[in-house]
Amino acid sequence: MRRDLESREADDTPSNFSRSGAISLKSESIGANLRANEDRRPGKEAYLLREEARVFRLGDVGQNRGEPHKEGHIRLPKGKVAEREENPSFELSGKLPDSIGNLKSLTILNLGECNLSGTIPSSISNLSQLQRLDLSINSFNGPLPTNLGNLKKLTVLYLYGNEFIGDLPRLLRNLTQLEELHLSYCNFDSQILNSVTNLVKLKKLLLSDSSFVGQVPSSLGNLTRLEDLELSSNRFNGELPSSLGNLTKLKRFDLSQNSFSGHIPFSLGNLMQLEDLDLSWNSFSGEIPPTLGNLRQLGLLRLSYNVLTGDFPLSLANLNRLSVLDLSCNQLTKLFDPSNALEKLAGLTSLDLSNNSIAGAIPSSLFRIPLLEELRLDQNQLTSLEYDNISSSSLWSLDLRFNNLTIEFSIFSELSHLSCLYLSHNNISMPNEGVNVTFPKFSVLELSSSNIKRFPDFLKTQDELAHLDLSNNKISGKIPKWFWTIGKSFMSELYLSDNFIDGWEESPSVTPWETWRLLDLHANNLTGAVDPILCKIGLLVLDLSKNRLNGTVPQCFGNSSELVVLHLQDNNFHGNLSNNMFTEYGCEIFKALDLSHNHLQGKVPQSLIKCQKLELLNLGYNQMSDVFPSWLQNLPNLRVLMLVSYKFHGPIWSPNKPLAFAELQILDLSFNHFSGLLPSEFFKNWTSMAKAPSDQEPYTTFLNTYLPAMGGISYDEPVTVIDLGNELAYSKILPILVCIDLSNNRFRGEIPRSLGNLRSLVALNLSSNNFSGPIPSSLGQLTELESLDLSTNKLSSRIPQELTELTFLQYLRHCSLR
């Protein structure tokens, strides 16, 4: 959060505040005795610069006057002069002392971003002359002093970026001289807006991301001096009053990420000085008011993620200063009519109309907007593109994915600066082989699900490609030899999955691309052994699953120091996994290993313990025979463990080796020969499953951890879970997917009561075992449970009343229990 605040610091600072990270002391009786300030007369400003600082403790402010101080302590002889000792540098830290109230002549107090903590002392209300107070970006907590309202001369109050809580209304009512109020990024939980409507001198009202609630009162329209109104990322709701049209001096208006509803008021068209308008991520409905076309100063307009309907209003073509226009994720049905009106948007650089219901043809006038750089029309119902005079000297990113387009790829040759082109899920016709067409140099090219039947020839000249997606097409045969020359030193991600590729004409003798990080060839017709070159090219992600590869799993994969994700499932690999396959150096960043659905034998290699960052391990549906590898609990990040098979056996719990899978989110040991008791202590230390769902961290493996740091590589981690008898493939494991499946084994004894502590469980399957005794009533604590199967056991008694109160439970199988 601090970086977000720092990026806004310059905009949110009063013009005469010192923003060097300083404490600024200014009054008639407080001066400076600093080496950098030769004039020591009272009445001058003292800037105690933290850039020069090492230690500056506030605990002695106003105390022990006249006594010698060390390490840059501040002393106030006779309460008039702020003086520091010989130490040339110091910084602020610690708590704000009660003695701050002794500085009664202070008019400016700026302690922004000073690493201060604790509560604000009530003595601060003694600073009756204070006009500007900045305590932003610290670690203050607790409620604000109720007597802060005594500072009636305050014109600027900045408290953002702290951990304050509590109610604010009474405190604010008396601060009638306020011109700037910034309370963003705190934990306030109150209906604040009714309490600020009497602060008629306000120019800035910044309340983002602070859990404020309630509706916008019509009286907010009385704050006619407002220039900046930001209420984003709160819990405001209801309809907007038309009185907001009275705020004619507004330049920035941000209501994004709330729960506002109803129509956007036509009166917003009165805000003629508005430069930024953001109403995104709400529930506004109806048509976009044509009056928004009056806002001729507008540079940014975001109305995305609402329920807006109708046509794209023609009046928006009047906004010739508009730079960013985002109307995505609504229910708009039509572009401008007449379509050439788009050309009037002379300043537009970014246009996003994605995820609407826009049908028909894409007008060629879109490509004649002179400064347009980014155009998104993906996820609509567009069927064609007007071909006449398509050219642009500025457009570098074009997204037309997920439409019903039937277009010739050659038309994009006219867009000379195009770098990122997204055409997936359309019907694309490639130039015939041998046809000479010059295309722009692409860096990103996505052509998945586009009915392509061969490797396009034009790729031979694409020497700047970094990301290429040809997945889910009809490409057959072998990868041509020339393919390894595209992209030169740029290629990073290559997606060729779901085709009919059966190999390559010639395997490269050396790594084709030093920057290569991802290769996805799953669901093709690859046969034979894995090419050894794949162990040497420094990949982070390798997916060869769902092919017909055979032989043994190459041991070199366990020695790859760069591999993060390895998917070899659904092939014909056989033999044992070498117990020395994984080395500490080789798998130090390994996060996901899936070898399921092969013909592997032997035991789980104990060298896996060296892969300390492993999050997903799936060895299911093989022919491995082993006892339960309890040593896997020593993998501190393991989230998914799947050993579905027919030959694992023995107990999975020992009183001498209690299990503690702290981060486990999915456990599937079904269809084995595991036996013995599951005592209540078994699940005692499974802390991740015991968390409330709101406290769960999403399992996204490398998605949000390692790979983004390596250049933003994206890859969905597929996991298949058997639920309600069906195999469900999940592309990511989210917090809501927390499952235990111990079915079809030989467990006996009572069902552990401690299962009731695993509050995040969504699915629990204990069927087809030898469990006996009553169903524990503690299962009624599993409030997220959707699927529970206890059938084919030897359970007695009735179904506990507590289970009938599980509101999310959709499937309960229990075999005749009542």
Image (spheres, rainbow, N blue to C red):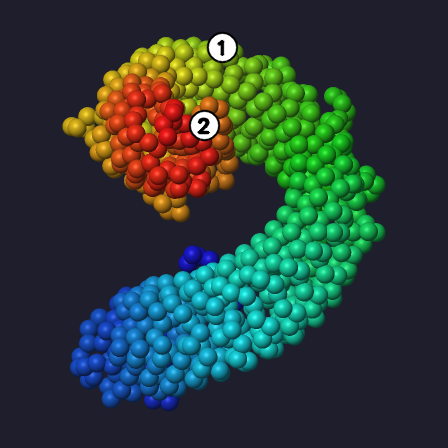
Is residue 30 at least partly visible in the picture?
no
Quadrant in which residue 462 is drawn? top right
- Secondary-structure class at tag 2: strand
Q: Where is residue 5 in the image (x, y as percent from the top left)?
A: 45, 61
Instruction: Give me the C-alpha separation between circle 1 and circle 2.
Output: 34 Å
Q: Mark 2 points at which residue?
A: 723
Is residue 412 at least partly visible in the picture?
yes
Q: First in sequence: mark 1 or mark 2?
A: 1
In which quadrant is the C terminus drawn? top left
Q: In this rendering, would 196 be left or right of 799?
A: right
Query: Measuring 63% from the left and 16% from the top, which residue is drawn there?
Result: 476
In the image, residue 814 above or below residue 93: above
Q: Name the residue under label 1.
A: 528
Crowding at dot 1, Cα within 10 Å, few <14 / some 14-19 / many 20+, comes out as some
Quadrant in which residue 416 is drawn? top right
Which of the numbered marks, if any, corresponds to residue 73?
A: none
Q: In this rendering, would 622 be left or right of 631?
A: right
Depth order, front residue of 774/639? 774
Q: Position of residue 527 (x, y in %)?
A: 52, 11
- Secondary-structure class at tag 1: strand
In which quadrant is the N terminus drawn? bottom left
In the image, residue 701 above or below residue 292: above
What's the residue type where badge 1 is placed? Gly
Query: Measuring 35% from the left and 40% from the top, which residue is drawn there?
Result: 802
Depth order, front residue of 663/110? 663
Indicate which label's residue lies in the foreground, 1 or 2. 2
Q: In this rendering, would 226 be left or right of 408?
A: left
Crowding at dot 2, Cα within 10 Å, few <14 / some 14-19 / many 20+, comes out as some
What's the residue type where badge 2 is placed? Asp
